[in-house]
Amino acid sequence: MEFSPYGPVQANNVRNPNSPFALGDELVANDQLFSHGQHVGDDAFSCVVVSVPPQAVLADCTGIFRLPGGTIAFQTTAAPGPVPKQLAVTGGTGSYDNAGGDGTLTEFPNNTGTLTLHVLSLVARGG
């Protein structure tokens, strides 16, 4: 995975000069997905800042992985730093229209990272 620079959107005019973010600010990005060196898709995600200093910065994130055959939707919380982020797979389209599951996103200092998804097919029983 190759991360793009995130674009901060200042949504709150009440700002703490000691914090890069204010409550309600949004972070948006479009990252590139690779598998074994081959480009396989991208993501589109946004995070809303829900906690700022003096507490730890924390954001509520939602996004879509765009892959051949469809999309996979996800949610997570995010905090600055290299701690792996746990993802919840919340749905999908196309080949992934019954998707559920979880995943882990690990960020490295060189604007790359690894993404591991455990995707399940959530089909209602008896239908």
Image: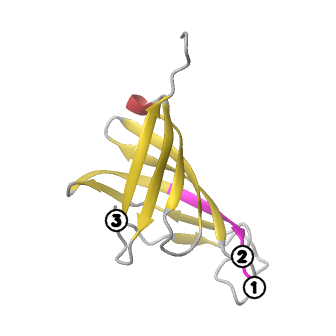
Query: What span is colored magenta in the figure?
Result: 45-53
Mark 1 and mark 2 in contact? Answer it, CB < 8 Å: yes
**CA distance for labels 2 and 3:** 27 Å
**Residue type, numbered disc 2:** Val
The quarter of the picture where residue 17 lies is bottom right
Q: Secondary structure at mark 2?
A: loop
- 103 and 51: which is toward the camera: 103
**Residue type, numbered disc 1:** Asn
Residue with the mark numbered 1:
16
Residue occupying the far right of the picture: 14
Residue occupying the far bottom of the picture: 18
**Badge 3 density bin: few <14, some 14–19, many ≥20, Cα 10 Å:** some
- Colour scheme used in the picture? secondary structure
Residue with the mark numbered 2:
52
Residue at the image position 68 percent from the left and 76 percent from the top: 56
The label on residue 2 is: 3
Decide whether residue 76 is among the magenta residues: no
Compared to residue 24, the image places residue 64 above or below, namely above
The quarter of the picture where residue 50 lies is bottom right
